[in-house]
Image (spheres, rainbow, N blue to C red):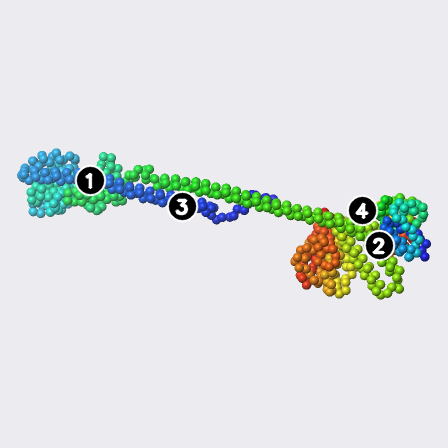
Amino acid sequence: MAEAPVLGPAGRTRARWWPLRLVSTVILLVMGGVVVASALITLSVIRDQERLLLRERTGEAAAVLGGAFAGVQSSLLLLGAIAATDRGHPQLFASAAHPEVTAPGQGLLVTAQRGTQMTVTAAAGTAPAVGSAIPPDQVRLAHRALVTRGMVSGLVRQGSRRWIAFGLGNAAGPATVVWEESALASTVTTKPSASSPWGNLDIALYLSARPDPSTLILATTRNLPLAGAQYPFRVGADTWLLVTSSPGPLVGSLAENMPWVILVIGVIAVALTVTVVETMGRRRDYADRLVEERTASLQNAMTELEAAQARLVQQEKLAAVGQLASSVGHELRNPLAVIMNVLYLLEAGTGADADEATRRHLATAKRETSTATLIVSDLLDYARGREPILGPVQVCDLVTEALSVVPPPAGVQVVDHCDPGITIHADRDQIRQAVLNLITNGYESMPDGGVLTVSASSESGSAHITVTDTGMGMDTGTRENIFTPFYTSKARGIGLGLAVTQRVVEAHDGTIAVESTPSVGSSFTITVPVMATMVSVAP
Amino acid sequence: MSRYTVLVVDDEPGMRDTLAAILELQGYRVSSAIDGETAFLAVQAESFDVVVMDVRMPGRDGVSVLQEMGNPPPQVILMTAYALEEQLRAAVKAKAFAILHKPFDARRMLSLVSDASQAER
């Protein structure tokens, strides 16, 4: 079963590839742009802030480290002075140095150059014994210390042991180096602690100005190299490098997530705004369409009302005319009958004695009386307009009969193309009258002669009767009015023939069509159902 | 010459006179009546072979005269300028010899009168 289409004010919805209206789209784009830009700017500001904070924290840590090692240089200077004044009494150095040794694995010592070797001349803590030689790494460091103003520092390896050594050249006399050395754990990685100068930062400390893995002495993570802030700082005469990164946001998690917060809130705000604008827009459109449709239907109703009123007025007019026609027609029949009787008497009275002129005048009077009789018949046919009384009608017989009732005028040739065997269910008198009217009409349109063709055929339940003439034809204005009662383009007649024909055809549930070309001719086609059903038509 | 008698009934003098003239010309003996009542009385008083009578007349109309004619009734030809209602037409057809629609050709009228006068009553 076919589903009835849901019609309403939205009946005219157009398919749009873009679901939003223009204003919503503009709002979406502008607000979306603002939101994304705000989020990006906030992100950039927060990253800058994060970098700045990391750099500050790194600088602070580096300052603390630098300060600690500055203390080493001054104690080495002091111990060097002690060692210089008490040459040959290493116990004095040892007792002076002893308080400085604060951690296991820490040692303080003095070395002096003896030829190509460096030997220990005084020691405290875990330093090598007096008189022993120092490892080659430390010798290289000692050579650098001797030519450098200020403390040098470096990593010393011997076997699997490593330690960091600070050396101050010529501190206990020429060609001497005073050392502080601290053993380093076998692994460089230690856990960060809150008490360390760098707090919770991940750090890597290099004994060089660049992040050279061979100079790494301390790291709080295995994920090296670190990709954070690099902060070089001076330790004695050398430059160390502190590299840090922050495992967590220094600006705080709220600040870190602020861009996302802005983005999410912004997207929600944009969505809400667009939804509100879209809803309001659609409501307005709906209201507009409603108003439009109501206006249109009102206009339609007005038009229909006007047309109905016009039809009513026309019907009333025609009914009044019909009534008038009926009484005039009937009243004319009596005098016409008397005139015909008189003409008969005149003819009979004069008989063969009548001269030529009298006979001609009598003939004219008879002809005109016949015409008047026909006009009255037309008038009464139209005024009567009775319901069809249906019965089987042989179309070809009917056509032949109609053609025989009105003989063709001089110069007109009649062609009868009738498919035999067509039977319609119709009112014989009425259909005959209709065909007769078309034939008479055709004759009258060919005053100078021509060909009148009557054809009948049937197809798919309909019978067609066509009357074609080669007469004067009609212009558009005439063609539009030929079925209007009392309209006529002829000098004679009162314009009811075709009106009667049309009414008869319509009463048989049929149609009448006309084609016409001026100076070429006209063609009228009656189409009626083979089994006509009665249709009531107002008289 | 025909010896048949014909009564012409019509309230229109022109119609009455011309019909009478035409019939007389053909040798019928013609009487005239100017309305239904007169015609009814005439038919009671005298025997006619044929009555040619208008339907619509002042007073008594042709149909009522036709229905009440005594025995043996003459052959009646009704003349009318109006279409008869279906019911009336059936009733009239049963009793009347013929119905003539005005205006008619005089020759047709004569032929009907001739037929009527020779018809069995």
Of the two numbered discs 1 and 2 in the rendering, the one whose residue sits closer to the viewer:
2
Tell me what residue is drawn at x 34 percent, y 44 percent.
A40
Where, by quadrant of the figure, is residue A408 drawn? bottom right
Q: Residue A338 got which mark?
A: 2
Q: Residue B85 got which mark?
A: 4
In three-dimensional space, the C-alpha distance between marks 1 and 3, rounded to whole angstroms, equals: 49 Å
Of the two numbered discs 1 and 3 in the rendering, the one whose residue sits closer to the viewer:
3
Which residue, given by chain and number where applicable, does mark 3 sit on? A30
Local secondary structure at mark 2: helix
Q: Which chain carries label 2?
A: A
Of the two numbered discs 2 and 3 in the rendering, the one whose residue sits closer to the viewer:
2
In three-dimensional space, the C-alpha distance between marks 2 and 3, rounded to whole angstroms, equals: 100 Å
Mark count: 4
Q: Do the residues labelled 2 and 3 touch (CB within 8 Å)?
A: no
Q: Residues within 10 Å of mark 1 (few under 14, many from 20)?
A: some
Q: Residues within 10 Å of mark 3 (few under 14, many from 20)?
A: few
Amino acid at the residue labelled 1? Ala
* Mark positioned earlier in the residue sequence (1 or 2): 1
Tell me what residue is drawn at x 87 percent, y 47 percent.
B35
Q: Which chain carries label 3?
A: A
Tell me what residue is drawn at x 84 percent, y 54 percent.
A338
Do the dots labelled 1 and 2 sit on one chain?
yes
Q: Residue A63 got which mark?
A: 1
Amino acid at the residue labelled 4? Glu
Amino acid at the residue labelled 2? Val
Residue A273, placed above or below residue A495: above
Left or right placement of residue A243 versus residue A336 in this view: left
Left or right placement of residue A413 versus residue A188 in this view: right
Amino acid at the residue labelled 3? Val
* Mark positioned earlier in the residue sequence (2 or 3): 3
Q: Mark 4 lies on which chain?
A: B
